[in-house]
Amino acid sequence: MTSEYYAGVAGAPGVAVGRVRRLTYGGDGEPATASPAQVGAAFDAVAARLRCTAQAMRERGENGTPADILEATALIADDPDLRAAAVAAVETGVPADRAVADAAERYAAVLAALPDPTLAARAADVRQVGRRVVQQLRADGGTNGSGPEPVILVAEELGADDLLEPAMVVAGAVSRLGGPNAHVAIVARALGVPLLFGVSLPSATEGRQAVLDTVTATLTVDPPPHRLEAARRAEAAARERRQELAARRDLPAVTRDGAPVTLLVNVSTVADAVAGLAAGAQGAGLVRTEVPFLSARAWPTRAEHAAALRPVLAALSGHPATVRTLDFAPDKLPPFLWGTSSRHRGLELMLAAPHTLADQFAAILDEADGARLRIMIPMVTTVAQLDRCRELLGAAAAERGVPVPPLGAMIELPEAVAAVDELAAAADFLSLGSNDLTAAVLGLDRRDPALTPARIADPVVLSAVVTVVRAARRHDRDVSVCGDAAGDPSLVPLLLGAGCRILSMAPTALDEVRAAVRDTTLGTSAPE
């Protein structure tokens, strides 16, 4: 049979071999008949499935980022307005599956049209929930199983949970819609599943052998024998490399010419902290605190903050732990903030209700538990904001009779870069959020396939990074990078050359980044 070649855009790196498996959600059979109560129950079942999958991942000690995304998607299935729209249509006689699909598409279209890119990116998650509810209504949850043979999963628009189907061994994935910043791409990278976007496959490819290669960004259906064998060798070599790198975790992260680099881990859960330290991280460069409260009905109390932080900081005892205050944003707003302007981010929201920030500071101080605590403020743009945070933190520390921990600022917006000299003087340390900074500086939509970690190499973005590094040096401040660029081994020489010496990343990226550091020679490339 003649080979067929399809070109796309890489979303997660790697090479995979498997049979094409088209993901379906009930097909084109008879319309599903269901009562309004049954529609509500289907939404409940989808939310529960997502949460159970996330919990099972956490119990296995797997990376927390996919679990976080599944839990956030479960909140969409809980959304009362989405449910009400579907139920209202059913009550007028519309078939249940069409009512759900139409409601999801209307809500997704509204989100996709919003100017805020992070909120617009949630449109794919809304459509995914709609498809899952339709699948539940048609009671065909097991139709996508494939047995033990690896598959290349194909869909018009993949969702994050599609890669976690228990009935399939997903070797690779292909989605016509989406881009490298979609949730499915984040999960694919965390799981090590190669992923392509922008590929539309004819139905005749179903069940045929295929090779997915993100280096060439192609999918080859019915590959010639030599191509198939080369891909299988690449898969085996990748497995061997992962094993070799894991065996070298005791080696220091030092460049060939002797420059030491600090490798830290980004943490959302206890599992992240444990996995990161096991992989040789020297501590946590980012402890996210908003994840446990994405379904909250009110600002978290001091006790609720403490309960969420306690196990994470205990796991980091004896290590640096940089705790970021709540960073609620349009793509991760809890129900009590759903009416908030999409322009507002975590810092603005908290400073508008300063008792909430004071409660969080108090809980962080109470639960330090031997961790070498640092506190980081997201989306800072002015020294006045940072001064107000320091005032609240100082009051909480004085109340407890403990020292005030270092207070740092995240540099994620052009306004912060413009004021970075003043911010560096006012802060105890700086952190570069490479994802938001790249998008903001280049004026790119967070959904744009062109917005990859590699765009930090754009001269305008790189100039901003160097500006921040130089300001930090002038004021003798540490500066770290904690966005996706820090976890991309191909960008390590660039970041080190720009003067960055502290990189914080997902646990799964540590081994490759350490190897990249050890392979880099800086010479005199770092800026003065």
Image (cartoon, grey):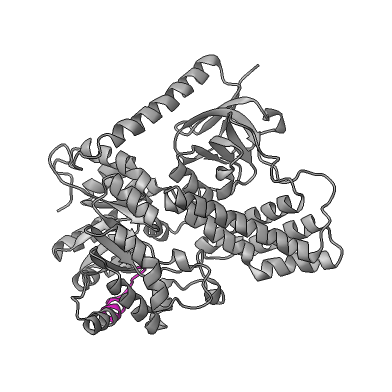
Is residue 126 in view from this perspective?
Answer: no
Q: Nearer the viewer, residue 362 or 206?
A: 362
Is 270 on the left-hand or right-hand side of 515? right
Residue at the spot 31% in from the left edge and 71% down from the top edge: 364
Q: Residue furthest right?
A: 93
Task: Return the x and y of residue 57 as percentages of the image width and height.
Answer: 48, 49
Is residue 382 on the magenta stretch?
yes
Residue at the spot 70% in from the left edge and 55% down from the top edge: 133
To which quarter of the image does residue 360 belong? bottom left
Is residue 515 on the magenta stretch?
no
Q: Is residue 216 above or below residue 491?
A: above
Task: Return the x and y of residue 3 as percentages of the image width and height.
Answer: 61, 20
Q: Nearer the viewer, residue 217 or 26?
A: 26
Q: Is residue 361 above or below residue 212?
A: below
Quadrant of the drawing holding the N terminus: top right
Task: Return the x and y of residue 127 as percentages of the image width and height.
Answer: 65, 55
The stretch in magenta equals: 378-390
Is residue 393 in view from this perspective?
Answer: yes
Most common secondary structure along the magenta stretch: helix
Is 195 on the left-hand or right-hand side of 258? right
Q: Is residue 188 above or below residue 339?
A: above
Residue at the spot 20% in from the left edge and 38% down from the top edge: 251
